[in-house]
Image (cartoon, rainbow, N blue to C red):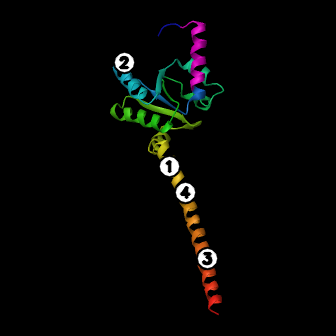
Amino acid sequence: MNKLNKEEKIRIVSELKDKFEKARGIVFTDYRGLDVEEITGLRNSLRSVDVEYKVIKNTLAKRAAEDTQVEPAKDVFSGPVGIAVGYDDPVLLLKKVLEFNKSNEKLEIKGGIVEGGVCTPEQIREISNLPPREVLLSMLVGAMQSPLSKLAGLMNSTITQFAYALENLKNKKNES
């Protein structure tokens, strides 16, 4: 790797820190054994869902992690580390990285950050099994609507029964 001058290092740390602060999901990988073509394939696969894949020097990544959500996981920066950063749906990020991992086992998942929480490789696999965010939100809305619609039906039924009772009472008074 080329020697970086001080200004380049400062710029890289600043850009990476900004990415760490904005990210909703981050996956740390060990890319040892992957050739350039395979890493390019991984980058293209991730780019299709607006995820970036970067390889940064560990010392710079540790510096960028300070005072961000990544700081508790900065021990992961040892050996060759690739960083996948996603800004939208973190589950989609995890699914894409694991999808590539299934077809190319040379890519090792070292851990990650999901919505600010540090995750082990096993937790990343579990979270990736969740449905996408939109599906979860629609399930939540459906669960919230169900009791409300039942309540509305019960209230309507009670009012209707009360109205029938009043009508019957009125009819009996008119008969008398």
User: Mark 4 against mark 3, which lies toward the viewer?
Assistant: 3
Q: Which residue: 48% across, 43% down?
A: 134
SS at badge 1: helix
Badge 4 is on which residue? 145
What is the three-letter code of the residue carrying label 3? Ala
Q: Nearer the viewer, residue 103 or 169?
A: 169
Magenta-colored span:
4-19
Q: In the shown orientation, is residue 131 left or right of residue 5?
A: left
Task: Residue 11: say if magenta.
Answer: yes
Badge 3 is on which residue? 163
- Tell which circle, 1 or 2, labels the residue nearer the N-terminal end: 2
Depicted 59 relative to depicted 164: above or below? above
Q: Could you give the CA–CA distance between mark 4 and mark 3, rounded to whole angstroms?
A: 27 Å
User: Mark 4 against mark 2, which lies toward the viewer?
Assistant: 4
Badge 1 is on which residue? 138
Quadrant of residue 169 within the rendered picture: bottom right
User: Mark 3 against mark 1, which lies toward the viewer?
Assistant: 3
Quadrant of residue 95 within the rendered picture: top left
Q: Could you give the CA–CA distance between mark 1 and mark 4, rounded to whole angstroms?
A: 10 Å
| Cβ–Cβ under 8 Å for marks 4 and 3 | no
Using the image, tell me which numbered label, if any, was put on residue 36: 2
Q: In the shown orientation, is residue 101 left or right of residue 113?
A: left
Q: Quadrant of the C terminus?
A: bottom right
Q: Could you give the CA–CA distance between mark 1 and mark 2, rounded to whole angstroms?
A: 41 Å
Q: Could you give the CA–CA distance between mark 4 and mark 2, rounded to whole angstroms?
A: 51 Å
Q: In the shown orientation, is residue 42 left or right of residue 137?
A: left
Q: Could you give the CA–CA distance between mark 3 and mark 2, rounded to whole angstroms?
A: 77 Å
SS at badge 2: helix
SS at badge 3: helix
